[in-house]
């Protein structure tokens, strides 16, 4: 291999291979290694000394919690928050921009309530990558790591990276009976299940506390937190007492770490089953009717309301999926993938479904968080896996466009009324400060007080940093 | 790699000696050599680590080769750089490569050393002398002499430290103490190592410290053991060479082994390990009351001959060979599983088994082992997976980069991969249900080897010559079928990997931890805990005609296999050495089958008739969850770690415990439905006319293979009186039994 090739490779990794894995190594960041101090056998004074010496306090916690609103299918950036009224008709589309409270930051005319709240929003207009398939692109958005290939067939496996929330659960878990990471109400898939929704190689212990039930349904409750019919809590206690007696006979709890570990989980499960704090957090029926109405009586709206309840209780990472599918062909269900296939048309669909839902939920959520004093330390992220083609297609709709799209951040330590990066005159490519999902991931971790260079280990014991990108310091307040 | 150098860092921060102390070649002005002195400093200060400037895209615009594998590259990076500011030949102290690591200007990586420290002086002197580049005439590092050497160093409490000394020997004959400049990396988490190579115990046990200097690396093996005061070996009899090796090592570690377990524990352990199920209450009673020596050996033979043995060990191979429905389809999965199971049942030698898998061609329906190649549809996947399954070698790292200190290079990787490049599939018709799901194949396929088909090296786009792993000349001839050629080599006597890797897998399945651990990660820097024993087992395997059962018999008849899990003396403080059996959770399938057996209900699995046991399930998802809601037992299996069979790695079967599992046992649907089901065994028992004592006893024998103790009987009777009624009490007792650690764990 000649030098030029080597440099090219070193700079970019072999195309289509596992570039991330080259980051094996040791550094000051090992201090913040995942798995906690216990695994290293470090004493606390030792660690404090280490941190002090390295002048390396973890980043300040600006976002205690994150609400990640994932817009599966890919919302059009040029029809929402990055409109191009000066572009030719085949680009600018039928919708008009309106002024928002932030000078020079117009939004779609279909988002008038959003327009009044843009002073809370930190808008990144220069998101970009090259993944054109939903599964690869969504995996990128949900993990911050470039997928090994741009392929609809990308299958969820332990060789891929974990979801943000699972990383948080691994490196900065809550020390309470509440789960650290909650996700709902769909498992998203396009052909096969989209990777990046769970803990992958971090282990099932770090999977999200996943809710498959519809928060909009009348009988919404969590099976985990409810005892089956015919089993009272008293009876369960009786069983537990007998279990404890048998355990005491085998003495396993005295000498086996596995036995102790298992028993701790029994304890925690019983605690959660009997905890009113946990049950209340998930009990959306305690919300006043007016509040429930304000979020919209649909699955996603009630999901956003539940997210607020959860962060209020202390949950650190909540992921709400807009829809289970990429959708785009219906005004009543499905995600943002509006190609205009089968004689459907994008604009009537988003006018009826996607924009009104966004207009109803996002400002309501931000208001609600702010009213309760939660917005300052709750980061809200609203984004899809890519944007849509600036040029309108033959079906009067737009196709996939990862080369440039927008992401919205709010609260949790980001600047409000701020735009980071810019797209070119047609919204086709970033013209300033391009941002990769890797950088956004690093920013989110940094805001949560987690060093983006923290290492975790995959199934082959390779040390991998949780975010390869650089945190975008400009947008941090 | 699991535990890396915290203390390297600490050492870097405060541990440098002043110049004039232990100085390196050329700490004096004018004699600094780039390739040895400067490169050593860059490694020692951590500059070229993967998370710093050794990152593939560098950091802060400055990139070094990963761990200093390319001095010429690093020289260019240091000397040409942003307008030459990294090196200031006029005022060396103004050089960024001094200011940054000394934290005199802002440095994201923090302070690596201080002005005046040895590394600072070395870099300054190097710049002062004109920053000369790598000199082909300068002496090359020939080897490292590390003390202690290759032998395991045993240190008995209260000794809790060991100073490692490192000497570098150069081609000009010079020999230097480089202890201060070597990099130390502990493997595992039982020791910490300072920047100067002082190894400190953080827990008792055996550990390896990797010592690196320039381009060389040597492992140091060290064991810190609890006090051996009045130590006297009191372990059980040595029954064969396995005990000799295991106990011999324990004696060196001044540890005792636990005693041999009782019959109850043995029967449960052996039945789980061989047949993947629990002994029934009748089996347990009969075994305990049977008299005479040799009953354990007879039980092992008996279990090895059961259908359950073939079921359970076929399950393990099904995991490794990626027998799953999406790619192989339901029929493919069934024929492949049947073939694996039949191979095990009939005692097919493992080399023949491997050969048939690697060379299978033709219809994936009519020639089941062809499903291995069908499952691994990408050339690199075939190469990596075959090395991992059959050779115990993980190649994935070498796909992207030469690991500076490991054996496998990118050339090895792509040469090996090229052997697999001519595999082709004829897909007659793909009747997949979801056209968008491009992973799915439904229908017969034919696997064949094309005449042409080369692998292009992604680094330079040139054709790669196929080459057997780790050989210089192992290329197939023009007319050879590359996979026949490969299979001949893999299964040949004397292949350095195959028999050792298989022996290690068998050991792992019975003993819970490989002699090389992880089980598929053989490399110089991951040495075996008992290399001679592993070699001997591999030889037994080869000489015994690769018969799986022979090796299993050897292991299970040893005292080492039959040890109790209860610690004696100080061996409870140590997890290494096989001094006692470490309890571990039952596999997902063992749990579901065990619950079904004790409670007397067959759970349902999607796509299968009721009555099939979990260990007999051929694949992973007969029906995808989106087409039919998984049954509670399907959910339970996944939750307890049944692998999706996407990886050829034992690690995919997760044995960890977590909260969701506890919920499933406490309030989840599967166990609750089983226990409260009207026609289960509890109902039969309740109506059987047995008295309370007999009922309690029967449940204990079923679940735990032993009678209840007095106190357990008393408590159970209290349960009967408070539960108000036989049936409810039986349910509560059954729940408590199957949720006891004794039930959930194999001990």
Image: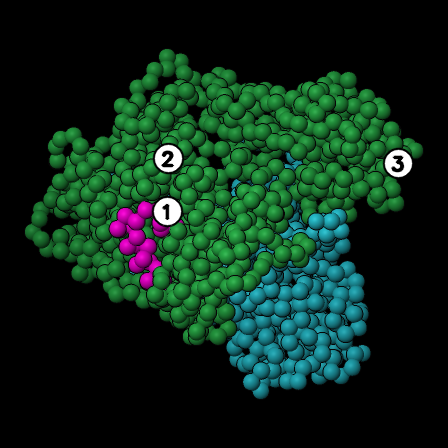
Chain colours: A cyan, B green
Q: Quadrant of the C terminus of chain A?
A: bottom right
Q: Residue at x 20, y 35 (%)?
A: B296
Structural crowding at the residue carrying mark 2, measured as other residues with C-alpha within 10 Å and reported as few (<14), some (14–19) or many (≥20): some
The disc, 3 or 2, on the residue closer to the chain's N-terminal end is 3
B588, B456: nearer the viewer: B456
Q: CA distance from mark 1 to mark 3?
A: 63 Å
Q: Main secondary structure of the magenta part?
A: helix
Residue B345 covered by magenta stretch: yes
Q: Which residue is mark 3?
A: B88
The answer to whether marks 3 and 2 mark residues whose Cβ atoms lie closer than 8 Å is no
Q: Which residue is mark 1?
A: B351
Secondary element type, mark 2: helix
A76, B165: nearer the viewer: B165
Is B327 rendered above or below residue B139?
below
Q: CA distance from mark 2 to mark 1?
A: 13 Å
Secondary element type, mark 3: loop
Pinpoint residue B718: horizontal percent, then vertical percent: 18, 43
Apparent side of residue A142 relative to residue B69 in the rendered image (left or right):
left
The answer to whether residue B256 of the structure is visible from this angle is: yes
The disc, 1 or 3, on the residue closer to the chain's N-terminal end is 3
Q: Residue at x 42, y 21 (%)?
A: B253
* Among the 4 quarters of the image, the one containing residue B511: top left
Q: CA distance from mark 3 to mark 2?
A: 62 Å
| Chain for numbered disc 1 | B
Q: Which residue is mark 2?
A: B539
| Chain for numbered disc 3 | B
Where does the magenta region start and end? B332-354
B337, B540: nearer the viewer: B540
Residue B208 covered by magenta stretch: no
Is B277 rendered above or below residue A260?
below
Secondary element type, mark 1: helix
Pinpoint residue A108: horizontal percent, then vertical percent: 70, 76
């Amino acid at each position: 291999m000649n030098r030029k090739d080597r440099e090219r490779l070193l700079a970019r990794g072999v195309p289509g291979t596992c570039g991330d894995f080259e980051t094996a190594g040791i550094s000051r960041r090992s201090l913040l290694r995942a798995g906690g101090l216990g695994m290293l056998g470090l004493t606390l004074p030792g660690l404090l000394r280490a941190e002090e010496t390295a002048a390396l306090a973890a980043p300040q916690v600006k976002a205690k919690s994150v609400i990640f609103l994932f817009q599966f299918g890919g919302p059009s950036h040029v029809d929402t928050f990055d409109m191009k009224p000066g572009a030719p008709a085949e680009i600018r589309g039928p919708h008009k921009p309106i002024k928002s409270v932030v000078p020079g930051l117009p939004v779609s005319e279909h988002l008038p309530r959003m327009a009044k709240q843009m002073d809370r929003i930190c808008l990144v207009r220069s998101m970009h990558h090259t993944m054109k398939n939903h599964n690869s692109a969504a995996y990128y958005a949900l993990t911050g790591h470039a997928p090994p290939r741009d392929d609809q067939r990308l299958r969820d496996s332990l060789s891929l990276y974990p979801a943000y929330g699972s990383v948080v659960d691994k490196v900065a878990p809550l020390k309470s009976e509440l789960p650290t990471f909650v996700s709902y109400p769909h498992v998203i898939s396009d052909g096969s299940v989209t990777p990046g929704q769970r803990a992958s190689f971090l282990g099932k212990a770090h999977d999200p506390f996943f809710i498959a039930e519809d928060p909009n349904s009348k009988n919404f409750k969590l099976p985990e937190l409810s005892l089956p019919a015919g089993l009272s809590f008293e009876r369960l206690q009786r069983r537990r007492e007998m279990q404890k007696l048998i355990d005491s006979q085998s003495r396993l709890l005295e000498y086996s770490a596995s036995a102790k570990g298992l028993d701790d989980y029994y304890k925690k499960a019983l605690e959660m089953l009997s905890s009113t704090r946990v049950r209340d957090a998930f009990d959306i029926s305690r919300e006043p009717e007016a509040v429930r109405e304000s979020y919209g009586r649909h699955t996603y709206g009630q999901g956003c309301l539940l997210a607020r309840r959860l962060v209020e209780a202390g949950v650190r990472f909540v992921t709400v999926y807009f829809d289970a599918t990429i959708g785009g062909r219906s005004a009543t269900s499905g995600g943002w993938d509006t190609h205009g296939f089968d004689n459907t048309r994008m604009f009537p669909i988003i006018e009826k479904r996607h924009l009104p839902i966004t207009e109803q939920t996002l400002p309501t959520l931000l208001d609600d968080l702010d009213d309760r004093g939660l917005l300052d330390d709750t980061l809200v992220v609203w984004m899809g896996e890519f944007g849509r083609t600036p040029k309108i297609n033959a079906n009067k709709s737009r196709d996939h466009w990862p080369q440039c799209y927008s992401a919205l951040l709010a609260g949790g330590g980001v600047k409000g009324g701020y735009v980071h990066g810019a797209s070119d005159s047609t919204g086709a490519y970033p013209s300033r400060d391009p941002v990769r999902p890797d950088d956004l991931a690093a920013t989110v971790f940094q805001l949560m007080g987690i060093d983006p260079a923290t290492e975790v280990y995959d199934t082959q014991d390779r040390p991998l940093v949780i975010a390869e990108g650089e945190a975008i310091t400009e947008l941090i307040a | 790699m699991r535990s890396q150098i915290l203390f390297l860092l600490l050492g870097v921060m405060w541990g440098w000696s002043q110049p004039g102390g232990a100085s390196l070649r050329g700490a004096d002005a004018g004699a600094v050599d780039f390739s040895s002195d400067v490169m050593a400093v860059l490694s020692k200060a951590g500059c070229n680590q993967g998370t710093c400037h050794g990152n593939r895209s560098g950091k802060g615009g400055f990139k070094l080769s990963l761990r200093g594998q390319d001095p010429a590259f690093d020289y260019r990076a240091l000397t040409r750089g942003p307008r030459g500011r990294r090196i200031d030949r006029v005022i060396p102290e103004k050089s960024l490569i001094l200011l940054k690591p000394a934290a005199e200007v802002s440095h994201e990586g923090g302070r690596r050393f201080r002005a005046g420290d040895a590394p600072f002086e070395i870099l300054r002197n190097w710049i002062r002398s004109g920053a000369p580049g790598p000199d082909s005439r300068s002496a090359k590092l020939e080897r490292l002499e590390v003390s202690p050497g290759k032998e395991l160093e045993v240190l008995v409490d209260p000794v809790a430290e060991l100073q490692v000394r490192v000497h570098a020997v150069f081609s000009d004959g010079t020999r230097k103490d480089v202890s201060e400049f070597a990099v130390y990396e502990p493997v595992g988490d039982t020791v910490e190592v300072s920047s100067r190579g002082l190894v400190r115990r953080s827990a008792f046990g055996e550990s390896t410290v990797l010592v690196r200097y320039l381009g060389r690396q040597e492992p140091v093996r060290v064991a810190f053991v609890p006090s051996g005061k009045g130590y006297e070996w009191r372990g059980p009899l040595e029954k064969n060479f396995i005990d000799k090796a295991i106990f011999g090592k324990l004696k060196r570690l001044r540890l005792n082994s636990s005693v041999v377990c009782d019959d109850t524990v043995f029967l449960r352990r052996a039945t789980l390990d061989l047949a993947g199920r629990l002994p029934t209450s009748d089996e347990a009673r009969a075994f305990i009351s049977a008299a005479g020596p040799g009953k354990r050996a007879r039980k092992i033979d008996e279990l090895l001959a059961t259908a359950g043995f073939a079921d359970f060990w076929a399950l393990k191979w099904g995991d490794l060979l990626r027998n799953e429905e999406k790619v192989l389809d339901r029929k493919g999965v069934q024929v492949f599983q049947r073939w694996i199971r039949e191979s095990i049942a009939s005692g097919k030698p493992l080399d023949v088994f491997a050969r048939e898998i690697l060379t299978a061609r033709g219809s994936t329906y009519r020639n089941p082992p062809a499903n291995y190649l069908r499952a691994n549809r990408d050339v690199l996947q075939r190469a990596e997976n075959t090395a991992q399954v059959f050779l115990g070698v993980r190649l994935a790292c070498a796909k992207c980069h030469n690991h500076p200190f490991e054996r496998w290079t990118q050339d090895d990787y792509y040469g090996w991969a090229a052997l697999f490049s001519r595999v082709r599939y004829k897909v007659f018709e793909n009747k997949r249900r979801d056209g968008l799901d491009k992973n799915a194949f439904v229908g017969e396929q034919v696997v064949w080897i094309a005449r042409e088909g080369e692998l292009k090296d992604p680094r330079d786009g040139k054709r790669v010559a196929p080459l057997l792993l780790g050989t210089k000349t192992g290329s197939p001839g023009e007319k050879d079928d590359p996979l026949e050629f490969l299979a001949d080599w893999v299964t040949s006597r004397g292949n350095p990997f195959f028999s050792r890797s298989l022996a290690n897998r068998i050991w792992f399945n019975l003993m819970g931890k490989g002699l090389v651990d992880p089980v598929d990660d053989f490399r110089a820097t991951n040495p075996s805990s008992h290399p001679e024993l592993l070699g001997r087992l591999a030889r037994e395997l080869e000489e015994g005609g690769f018969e799986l059962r022979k090796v299993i018999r050897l292991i299970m008849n040893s005292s080492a296999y039959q040890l109790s899990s209860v610690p004696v003396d100080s061996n409870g403080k140590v997890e290494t050495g096989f001094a006692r059996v470490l309890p571990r959770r039952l596999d997902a399938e063992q749990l579901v089958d065990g619950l079904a057996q004790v409670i007397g209900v067959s759970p349902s699995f999607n796509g299968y008739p009721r009555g099939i046991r979990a260990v007999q399930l051929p694949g992973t998802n007969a029906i995808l969850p989106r087409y039919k809601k998984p049954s509670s037992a399907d959910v339970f299996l996944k939750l307890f770690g049944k692998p999706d069979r996407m990886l050829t790695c034992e690690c995919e079967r997760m044995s960890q415990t977590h909260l969701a599992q506890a919920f499933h046992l406490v309030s989840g649907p599967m166990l609750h439905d089983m226990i409260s089901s009207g026609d289960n065994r509890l109902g039969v028992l309740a109506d059987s006319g047995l008295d309370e004592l007999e009922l309690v006893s029967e449940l204990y024998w079923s679940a735990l293979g032993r009678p209840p103790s007095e106190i357990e009987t008393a408590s159970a009777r209290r349960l009967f009186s408070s539960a108000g009624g036989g049936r409810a009490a039986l349910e509560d007792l059954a729940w408590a039994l199957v949720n006891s650690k004794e039930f959930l764990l194999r001990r």
